Image: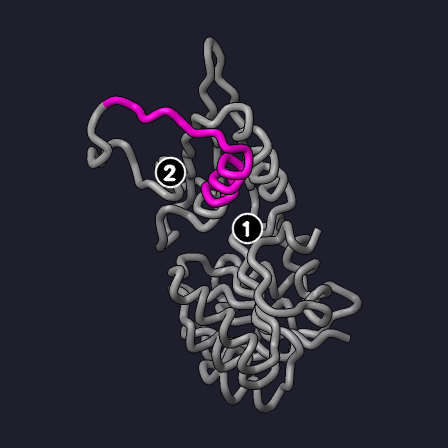
């Protein structure tokens, strides 16, 4: 049995992870942490109560994996888990490049693997892969990403990773995008990551959506993924948990596990 602790267990994603882990025959939910609902018993996992002190939970429960959906992202949680020999699977986005570098360094210092997964939906992973393939032939591209109003970070981790994959594919193929007219500093042009413009929408009713739009001579190609419910992320979460014991170093992106 894989012993799992969920951080951010009372949140929207954390609650779904609790349900998925509790229902998995090869996993055991041994602890739950959050800053809200402290002391409450989780209805999906009888006998498991929400606690605030992560260190106490890790020490007492001795889990194999910590799934982290606490917001905003807290590097201290990652550090604490790895110091206890627990593999952190980080679903919270918004890490800086410096934080990612520190997590990678921690894998070397502690000998414990870590996973940073911007998007757990299999369809989203395919969307990113197809976008990178298309960028070789249609290098002119922009991204529109849409999420619910409670998402803290923008652009999303998924859109940033998509831009990184597009950038790597264009460089490998030695193709360049055109530079659009107008000022690149105009806020209406969105953010820019790896030479790709990203436009972020935050509205109630949305879950997680992304459209990658390619422009070419006389044509437009759109690659879009929509998560309509948070259950769409759970197969990817369970996959990451099951692969954690074989992981080495830092795993960035679910595509590395497929």
The image's mark for residue 195 is 2
- In terms of secondary structure, what is the magenta stretch mainly? helix
Region of the chain picked out in magenta, as a range? 162-181
Using the image, determine if residue 145 lies above or below residue 85: above
Task: Name which residue lies at 68% across and 55% down.
Answer: 257
Instruction: Give the label, 2 or 1, closer to the camera.
Output: 2
User: In screen coordinates, is 118 left or right of 112?
Assistant: left
Pinpoint residue 65: horizontal percent, then vertical percent: 63, 74
Using the image, determine if residue 60 lies above or below residue 151: below
Element at label 2:
loop
Quarter occupied by residue 114: bottom right
User: In screen coordinates, is 97 left or right of 61?
Assistant: left
Residue of label 1: 119
Pinpoint residue 189: horizontal percent, then vertical percent: 27, 32
Q: For the residues labelled 2 and 1, say whether their Cβ atoms are less than 8 Å apart.
A: no
Quarter occupied by residue 72: bottom left
Structural crowding at the residue carrying mark 2, measured as other residues with C-alpha within 10 Å and reported as few (<14), some (14–19) or many (≥20): some
Closer to us: 20 or 182: 182
Using the image, determine if residue 2 lies above or below residue 228: below
Pinpoint residue 97: horizontal percent, then vertical percent: 40, 60
Closer to us: 102 or 208: 102
Whichever of callouts 2 and 1 sits on the residue coming sooner in the sequence is 1
Separation of residues labelled 2 and 1 (CA atoms):
21 Å
Task: Name which residue lies at 43% across and 29% down.
Answer: 176
Pinpoint residue 1: horizontal percent, then vertical percent: 77, 75
User: In screen coordinates, is 246 left or right of 102?
Assistant: right
Element at label 1:
loop
């Amino acid at each position: 049995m894989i012993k799992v602790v969920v951080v951010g267990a009372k949140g929207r994603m954390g609650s779904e992870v609790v349900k998925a882990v509790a229902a998995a025959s090869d996993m055991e939910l041994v602890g739950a942490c959050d800053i809200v609902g402290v002391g409450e018993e989780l209805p999906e996992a009888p006998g498991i109560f929400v606690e605030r002190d992560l260190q106490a939970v890790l020490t007492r429960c001795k889990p194999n994996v910590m799934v982290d959906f606490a917001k905003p992202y807290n590097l201290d949680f990652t550090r604490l888990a790895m110091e206890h020999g627990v593999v952190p699977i980080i679903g919270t986005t918004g890490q800086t490049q410096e934080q990612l570098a520190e997590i990678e360094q921690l894998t070397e210092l502690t000998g414990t693997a870590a996973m940073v997964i911007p998007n757990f939906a299999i369809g989203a992973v395919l969307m990113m892969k197809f976008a990178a393939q298309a960028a070789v032939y249609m290098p002119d591209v922009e991204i529109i990403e849409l999420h619910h109003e409670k998402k803290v970070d923008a652009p999303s981790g998924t859109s940033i990773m998509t831009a990184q994959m597009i950038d790597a594919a264009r460089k490998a193929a030695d193709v360049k995008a055109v530079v659009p007219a107008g000022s690149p500093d105009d806020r209406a042009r969105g953010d820019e990551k790896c030479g790709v413009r990203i436009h972020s929408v935050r509205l109630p009713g949305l879950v997680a959506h992304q459209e990658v739009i390619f422009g070419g001579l006389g044509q437009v190609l759109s690659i879009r993924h929509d998560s309509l419910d948070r259950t769409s992320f759970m197969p990817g979460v369970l996959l990451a948990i099951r692969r954690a014991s074989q992981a080495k170093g830092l795993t960035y992106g679910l595509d590395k596990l497929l």
